[in-house]
Image: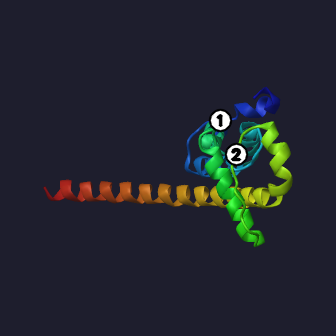
């Protein structure tokens, strides 16, 4: 994390506020669908850039891990194939250089398009979901407090 310099010590990057968590979900889920080996660095840079929660942004990238990667990147491939109107061929993702050399030439367009669409979609869905969940939680807590006050006054 030293590559980010002193900006990494800004308190806003480390506190859990409504806005920092929303932005963390946007950044973390967006970079989770990038098929690159340095997703965590990109997520950290994105969190710093838009002032999202840094640890949460980096942690959310791990949605794509060696166990989930074949499923999520297979989904991304199918999304890309669907958008391009192509016929899907069997897509068995492997995390190896040999797989990339032999298969990426055939599947790179639908795969990368699908990754881009899934990255944007996941980031926006995460951002909007957290925005409304947090709002719902606050309104619910306020209503409960209001009901408790009403109940304690009438008792």
**Pick the front one: 132 or 139:** 132
Q: Which residue, given by chain and number where applicable, does mark 2 sit on? A: 51
Graded by Cα atoms within 10 Å as few (under 14), some (14 to 19) or many (20 or more), the crowding at tag 2 reads many
Mark 2 to mark 1: distance in Å? 10 Å
Q: Is residue 72 above or below residue 114?
A: above
- Residue 46 appears at what percent x and percent y? 74, 45
Residue shown at the point (15%, 59%) measured from the top left: 154
Q: Nearer the viewer, mark 2 or mark 1?
A: 2
- Occupied quadrant, residue 94: top right
Whether residue 120 is visible here, answered yes or no, is no
- In the picture, which quadrant includes the N terminus? top right
Q: Are marks 2 and 1 in contact (CB under 8 Å)?
A: no
Residue shown at the point (63%, 57%) measured from the top left: 122
Q: Which residue, given by chain and number where applicable, does mark 1 sit on? A: 11
Q: Residue furthest bottom?
A: 85
Residue shown at the point (70%, 50%) measured from the top left: 33
- Residue 114 appears at what percent x and percent y? 73, 60
Tag 2 secondary structure? loop
Report whether 91 appears left or right of 147. right
- In the picture, which quadrant includes the C terminus? bottom left
Residue shown at the point (71%, 31%) measured from the top left: 9
Whether residue 22 is visible here, answered yes or no, is yes
Report whether 77 appears left or right of 144. right
Label located before the other in sequence (2 or 1): 1
**Pick the front one: 136 or 58:** 58
Q: Residue furthest left?
A: 155
- Residue 14 appears at what percent x and percent y? 62, 36
């Amino acid at each position: 994390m030293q590559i980010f310099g002193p900006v990494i010590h800004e308190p806003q990057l480390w506190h859990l506020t409504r806005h920092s968590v929303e932005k963390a979900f946007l950044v973390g889920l967006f970079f989770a669908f990038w098929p690159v080996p340095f997703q965590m660095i990109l997520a950290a840079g994105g969190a710093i850039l838009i002032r999202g929660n840094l640890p949460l942004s980096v942690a959310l990238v791990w949605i794509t891990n060696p166990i989930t990667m074949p499923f999520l990147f297979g989904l991304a491939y199918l999304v890309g194939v669907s958008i391009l109107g192509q016929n899907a061929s069997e897509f068995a993702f492997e995390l190896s250089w040999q797989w990339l050399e032999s298969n990426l030439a055939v599947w790179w367009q639908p795969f990368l398009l699908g990754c881009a669409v899934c990255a944007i979609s996941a980031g926006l869905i995460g951002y909007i979901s957290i925005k409304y969940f947090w709002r719902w939680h606050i309104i619910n807590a306020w209503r409960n407090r209001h009901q408790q006050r009403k109940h304690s006054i009438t008792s």
